[in-house]
Amino acid sequence: MDERIPSGAAIVVGMPRVLLIEDDQAVRDGLSMALGGRGHAVDAVATGEEGLARLASRPPDIVVLDLMLPGLDGFEVCRRIRAAGDLPIIMLTARNEDIDVVAGLAAGADDYVVKPARAQVLEARIRAVLRRTGQPAPAVPAPVEIERHGDLGIDRAGLTVTKADKPLALAPTELRLLLELTQVPGRVLSRQYLLESVWEHGYFGDSRVVDACVQRLRAKIEDDSSAPVYVQTVRGFGYRFGPL
């Protein structure tokens, strides 16, 4: 089976393409009909293996992935997609428990919805993830201005990051988080503020989404993620960007 996975897909504003990987036929059919009625083109499959094959043959704009799949489970499917590129992923989890949510976010998911998933909630999350991961090119090329933080270089116009002058591959949510943190180095940002500004959650959301993304970002930009210099935890408050 060909499991080559595209690094991403262009966002189609009028008809976003959703790959739904869900083994429960009733849930699969219900979400397919509901999302289709809300303007999404839905491609639904029942297994992780089918999902990976479909990614190669019909690249979507976003993946909605059940964690508890038979055979190749959702965690492994998520890891494979994320290892290959920055395709947005929303995971479906049957239980709002730390072990499931944290493991799914650590595997690379951008967001999650607890089952039974209400179609309007899932659709809102899909729209939010697509908005924040879509990166249209500027109409007129702007002069390249590199913002320096230690050995990190950030090109905000070009949406690229380097470490020691070598390009870093950041997923869209990781990049948005880094851009937000570096707006004012040294300023402490609460988890709730980051949920609203990076994830566009307009309610009291789940800080585990932020914490998991911080861990993934640290693994890429820090020399030692266990002793972070750039993304620093301010216990009881949130995060700030250094070095100070």
Image (tube, grey):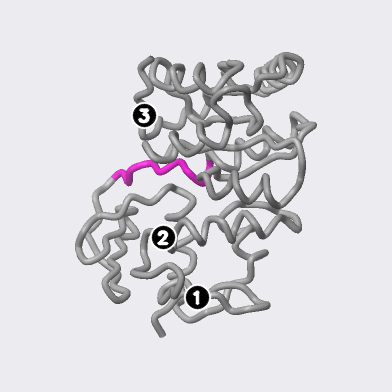
Magenta stretch: helix, strand or loop mostly:
loop
- Judge whether 41 appears above or below 94 on screen: above
Disc 2 element: helix
Q: Residues in magenta?
A: 131-139
Marks 2 and 1 in Cβ contact (< 8 Å) = no
- Please report whichever mark, 2 or 1, sits nearer to the chain's N-terminal start: 2
Disc 1 element: strand
Rendering coords of residue 134 (x, y %): 45, 41
Residue bearing mark 3: 6
Rendering coords of residue 51 (x, y %): 51, 21
Disc 3 element: loop
Residue bearing mark 1: 232
The residue type indicated by label 3 comes to Pro
Rendered-image quadrant of the C terminus: bottom left
Q: Please give the name of the residue rendered at 48% of the width and 29% of the height, measured from the top-left corner.
A: 61
The residue type indicated by label 2 comes to Ala
The residue type indicated by label 1 comes to Gln
CA neighbours of label 2 inside 10 A, class few (<14), some (14 to 19), many (20+): some
| Disc number for residue 219 | 2
Q: Please give the name of the residue rendered at 71% of the width and 21% of the height, measured from the top-left corner.
A: 31
Say if the magenta span includes residue 134.
Answer: yes
- Picture quarter containing residue 163? bottom left
Answer left or right for 116 relative to 90: right
CA neighbours of label 3 inside 10 A, class few (<14), some (14 to 19), many (20+): some
